[in-house]
């Protein structure tokens, strides 16, 4: 078990015996371990060289006591772990160089075609499970692989500290249960924005792999075909597409404690009002908002009029302009 710290089998047995006994002489150690005197002497010399034992004064001759494990073994394990970490980094670098070499020699490895819904679903889960830093999503209306409520991998990834930036198509926010689902994700750390229309469905994990359908409008009874795209100019173009859409999308914000860190100081809106405003600016109809939030249409309209009074706006367009100018969103 302690070979990782550099101990051989005999040294480990001898050290464990000394730790239990507190001290021992050469003869006693040889007898307890069923070793010859020469083998016991060699083990003690090796352990002394590693700083595991020390010689103490004894009335019957030379005796040996163990050095505390955290003192004797702790630094050795730290150095060994550092060596392993350096080796892992070297392996990662070599693996990336190997993949880059393959991509230069075999362009087919840049794009992998996924021919079925099952294969696509497997990759959606795998990319999120293996993500370390960030996942970027284009979420269009009408699911192809699975509904958003079934995407438990996102919740687990958020729990690991993976950043999520998600752009929702406006029509998706009107689907039953989506507003509550988005609000739950935001409370767990998801950054969410909305646009009127998204050109494709897409997921990008750690800026190293993208996944998107090749046939945009496959029916529920038709197997979708998707592409898994690895490091290339095509991947860089997809990342640029996401960033461009992100810049023009409307933020969706919802915080239980009412604290919104990126609004201007003195913002008069509480968390619920900010969430309502973000949905309005994203273009979600009042009727859909009422249905999603479990409110009456009259209640939603009353709250919208309240926002308009706070902004001094006569129309919803003026409300959106005022919110942008004052950095309420």
Image (spheres, rainbow, N blue to C red):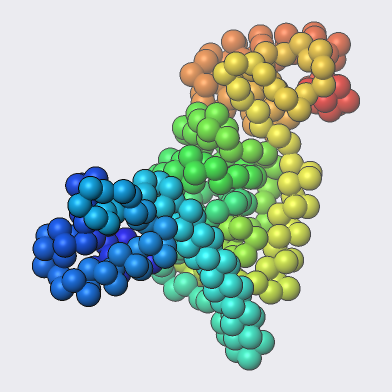
Q: Looking at the image, which residue is at 53% across and 33% down?
A: 188
Q: Nearer the viewer, residue 13 or 298?
A: 13
Quarter-wise, where is residue 46 in the image?
Answer: bottom left
The answer to whether residue 204 is above or below residue 272 is below
In this image, 287 relative to 78: left or right? right
Quarter-wise, where is residue 8 in the image?
Answer: bottom left
Q: Position of residue 259 (x, y in %)?
A: 67, 18
Looking at the figure, which quarter contains the N terminus? bottom left
Whether residue 314 is visible to the viewer of this picture, yes or no, is no
Q: Nearer the viewer, residue 165 or 45?
A: 45
Looking at the figure, which quarter contains the C terminus? top right
Q: Position of residue 143 (x, y in %)?
A: 48, 51
Q: Looking at the image, which residue is at 81% across and 12% down?
A: 266
Q: Position of residue 187 (x, y in %)?
A: 55, 29
The answer to whether residue 25 is above or below residue 162 is below
Q: Position of residue 172 (x, y in %)?
A: 56, 41
Whether residue 136 is visible to the viewer of this picture, yes or no, is yes
In this view, which residue lies farthest toward the right? Answer: 325
């Amino acid at each position: 078990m302690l070979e990782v710290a550099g101990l051989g089998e005999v040294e480990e047995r001898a050290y464990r015996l000394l730790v239990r006994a507190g001290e021992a002489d050469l003869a006693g150690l040889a007898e307890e371990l069923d070793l010859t005197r020469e083998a016991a002497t060699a083990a003690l010399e090796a352990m002394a060289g590693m700083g595991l034992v020390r010689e103490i004064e004894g009335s019957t001759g030379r005796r040996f006591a163990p050095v505390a494990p955290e003192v004797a073994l702790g630094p050795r394990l730290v150095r060994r772990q550092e060596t392993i970490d350096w080796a892992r980094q070297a392996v990662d670098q070599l693996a990336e160089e190997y993949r880059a070499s393959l991509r230069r020699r075999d362009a087919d490895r840049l794009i992998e075609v996924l021919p079925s819904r099952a294969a696509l679903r497997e990759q959606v889960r795998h990319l999120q499970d293996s993500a370390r830093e960030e996942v970027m999503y284009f979420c269009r209306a009408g699911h192809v692989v699975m509904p958003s409520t079934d995407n438990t991998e996102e919740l687990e990834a958020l729990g690991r500290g993976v950043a999520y930036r998600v752009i929702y198509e406006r029509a998706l926010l009107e689907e039953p249960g989506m507003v509550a689902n988005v609000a739950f994700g935001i409370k767990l750390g998801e950054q969410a924005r909305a646009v009127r229309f998204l050109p494709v469905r897409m997921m990008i994990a750690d800026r190293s792999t993208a996944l998107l359908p090749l046939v945009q409008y496959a029916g529920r009874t038709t197997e979708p075909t998707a592409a898994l795209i690895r490091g290339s100019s095509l991947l860089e173009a997809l990342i640029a597409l996401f960033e461009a859409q992100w810049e023009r999308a409307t933020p969706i914000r919802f915080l239980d404690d009412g604290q919104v860190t990126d609004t201007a100081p003195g913002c008069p809106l509480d968390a619920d009002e900010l969430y309502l405003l973000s949905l309005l600016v994203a273009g979600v109809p009042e009727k859909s908002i009422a249905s999603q939030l479990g409110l009456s249409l009259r209640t939603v309209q009353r709250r919208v009029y309240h926002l308009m009074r706070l902004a001094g706006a006569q129309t919803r367009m003026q409300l959106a302009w005022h919110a942008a100018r004052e950095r309420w969103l």
